[in-house]
Image (cartoon, coloured by chain):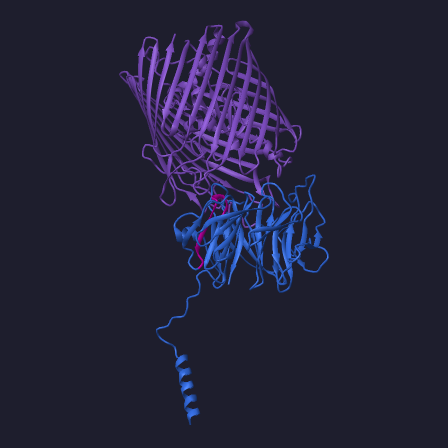
Chain colours: A blue, B purple
Amino acid sequence: MKKFSIAICICLFAFTACKKDENETPAPLPKYGNGVFIINEGVFQSGTGTVSFYNKSNNVVEHDLFQQINGIPLGNVAQSLTQYGGRTYIVVNNSNKIEVVGAADFKSVGTIDGLVSPRYMTAVSGSKGYVSGWDNKVSIINLATLQISGYIDAGTGPEKMLLRDDYLFVLNQGGFDIDSTITVINTLTDAVVKTIQVFHKPTGITAQDDGTIWVMCSGRGWNGFPQPGDTPGHLISIDPQSLELETDLVFPDTDYHPEKLVIDKTSNTLYYNYPGGICRHEIGESTPDVTPFISHAGLFYALGYDPKDKVIYASDPLNYNQDGWVYRYRASDAAKIDSIRAGIIPGEFWFVD
Amino acid sequence: MMERWLMFLPVIQIFSLFEVHSQEPADTAMNLPPVNITSKYISNTVAGKKTDVIDSLRIEMNPSSTLSDLLQMHAAAIVKSYGPGSLSTLSLRGTSATHTDISWHGITLNQVSSGSIDFSLIPSQLFSGMSINRNGYNEDNYRPAVGGVVTLDNRNNYYPHNNILTSLTTGSHGLLSHFTRVNAGNSFIRTSTSIYFQENKNNYTYTDYSGKEKNLENAMVTGSGFMQDIYLDLERSGKFSYSVWYQDNQREVPGSMISNPGTSERFDKSLRSVMEWEKTGGNYTIMARQAYIIDWFRYSDIYIPSSLINSKVYLSTLQLTKKISKNFRLNSGLSNEFSKATGNNYEMNRDRNISSLYASFTGQMFEGRLNTSTIARIETDFIHDPVMLYSAGLTGKILPKLQSRISFTRTIHQPSFNDLYWVPGGNPGLKPEKAVSAETGLDYYIHGKTGKFTSVLSATMFSSSISDWIQWIPGEGFWSPENVTRVWSRGIESSCNIDIKFNSHSLALKIGYSYILSTNEESTMANDEALNKQLIYLPNHKATVQTDLQLKKWIFSAGSQFTGKSYVSSDNKYFLPDYFIMDLTINREIIDKKIKLNLLAGISNLFNEKYQVVQHYPMPGREFRLTLMCKLLN
């Protein structure tokens, strides 16, 4: 009897717990969730960068979020965006600042000033972040106070970065010159543990689930404008423990240079920009692919990969003086899904679940 | 003797027909009854085209101004300026900055590297006047200009009277400007020597987008230079002139309102010299001209590598003018332009030679009621096939007070050295841009019976199709110029000039309006929304009003301009709003025997309008300036 009563109580309790409380409201979906931030650089000097948001739920694009919500232009050349700890950090290159907004509502929280030509930011904790800049330094940022707390010397033109465990890999792309190194920083001590010698102009970095780091080195030169001294592109992998090069796949032609690099970790497939479109490389193949998997007249500008939907995003800024286009392709078969109108010079993507 | 008068007649006739506005206070003012000069003349000017003149009064009322400042108050001139003393270029009839030539003593001053010229570097006080021709040919050297030509004239400085002019201007935001000119000579030799210096901190206040007041940083400009003209009348041996102009400018380059304050500087130096000999005998005039131009440019920044370009141009022209009959004249000539340049963005020293052969036929018919001119020119750069160019025009009196004009023109514009040789991206295979233009217009003249009232009403319609337009387009990792698009520019220009004299006073009113549609007509890019859209930084509408009131020794001037909205993106989604600005100047003259003093006080942007000509570059608000000018007369 006693056991039966307990069981009844449990059932009643469960029933009560399942009953909808009319006073409860479901937690709102984040306004900027399940979508893609498109970072539009804007015209250099005389234009403003913007951030657009493509909502995958309803296929609606909102434009110029920062100005719409905060009432002032973002600044000149919006270079990149990162999110951490409920905040969104927008690196504004030619305004020497990072605008900090709430991740949920894009309302301004503050500004990180005093930077010199900042390019990309990586946050390692709620109180610490690193910013690469073309003053050839990586700035250490106190994210609690939004102040610069220190500097680490890097190579020429530090650009994209990748955090693996406690190590930050900084690509030294060369800025207005050319470089061929990767600076590795211990984020616990802020010391440079190694400068890895790679190949000319590292422009893309990503990593497999097993930690293997892949880097695209574009080579010296410009596509379609051959010059004496041009070097070929290299697709390389680095052992994250030994920090040594493991794989070196050389592109066959010094006239054509690959750029950018993204990964589908589930299929261990790499994608990169190449004249004529986007190529893909199955990790393990012995030569890099030079036949575009996705064709496009000319060279795409930005390249992104949505791991959730397995969709490739690529941008075309047209004449760099009008709203650009973002094209979406199915990674499985290169089928074009649709195209999205972005802002002026869509340069980077940030995917939000 | 008779030939000498014939040489001056075109000057007198032109000023009586188009711009009767030389109100430069005379040394001894005497009101003479009007005189009609009716002898026939044969003009070298291109018939069928509208020529506008900015006269000496405009220059005298704006003594510290640059060419950019003066042209902003002209309805047909679209000036794109980053701010006072900053880069400033001119577009005429919907064309680009490289399509506007600037001419001085028959030579084109556009830099071979960029193909354009910075109008903010040219002080207006050096000149006694300037004229603006659109869609045609340089009337001094028959060189084609797709957009048009601004001709700088300082030959009036040769005539008559020896004098010394010196002026000192001070104004808001650290403006300090000095100019001195000495004219001397006799019937055999005349010289004119000018020196100038200008400095401006340009640290004016503007309101940023968050509402804060800020001072513009890194915007200081300094400039100095001299000009020397020598003119010899060798009588039977002809006339010889030699002019040299040197200038040196240093400018800090400010950032925009949304970028960092700016850490760049630019340095521009130029040396221009031209020698000309002309001899007239019987029915012919022979002219030989030799010019030499050096431009030196450096752009430096603490964060980016410096850019350095040196260029040299050698120009030679030989021209024969023959009077075929009392009504017709034939000009023919041969010219050669050799340019070379070195720069750290050119792989190696670069050069180019352009030769041309031209002929011009001008004349009058029906007792002067119909003027005609035809130009034919063949030009080659010895790389591409020679190009045949032409212009034909008619100006005719329909009624005693009504004149009509019509002209057709085919011109080209050669690519600049930056277009051809810049690394990366330069395209040596570029073809010249080509333009076919037509215009027609009417001019209506009103003269009061007593000669105290004159008015000219003008209206012109134009259409110009420019093919193989050079555009820098993004390639596979860098930008490169291509002959990719065609632009169709069309529109209307209208003006109303009124001059009233009463007692010893005068009132002059000039109203101008232009409407321009200049659109991209071709594209090589898929999904290009710039197709059929207005070119950027080209407002559809511009209107100007200039009023000058002379009351004895006082001159009151008010100049205003309205500039319509201009697009800043090629898909025309984003634009700058329209703006209206007004300037005022008061000039008080004091004459005491051989000394003439002028005290000028001016206010620019009287209503403190907040506006931008280039997006995110604030223009100054209300500014003041004071000038003391002293002229010692002989």
Nearer the observer, B606 or A213: A213
In percent of width and height, residue A94 lies at 49, 43
Nearer the observer, B441 or A26: A26
Nearer the observer, B413 or B191: B191
Q: Residue at x 40, y 20 (%)?
A: B56
Locate the C terminus of chain B by quadrant.
top left
Q: Is residue B254 above or below residue B402?
A: below
Residue B332 occupies quadrant: top right
Determine whether, in the image, residue A51 is placed left or right of residue B502.
right
Q: Is residue A246 magenta?
A: no
Farthest residue, direction bottom: A1
Q: Which residues are magenta?
A: A92-103
In percent of width and height, residue A78 lies at 49, 48
Farthest residue, direction front: A189
Residue A95 in view, yes or no: yes
Determine whether, in the image, residue A55 is placed left or right of residue B175.
right
Residue B560 occupies quadrant: top left
Determine whether, in the image, residue A329 is placed left or right of residue B212.
right
Nearer the observer, B39 or A222: A222
In percent of width and height, residue B264 lies at 50, 35
Q: Is residue A132 above or below residue B1?
A: below
In percent of width and height, residue B366 lies at 46, 19
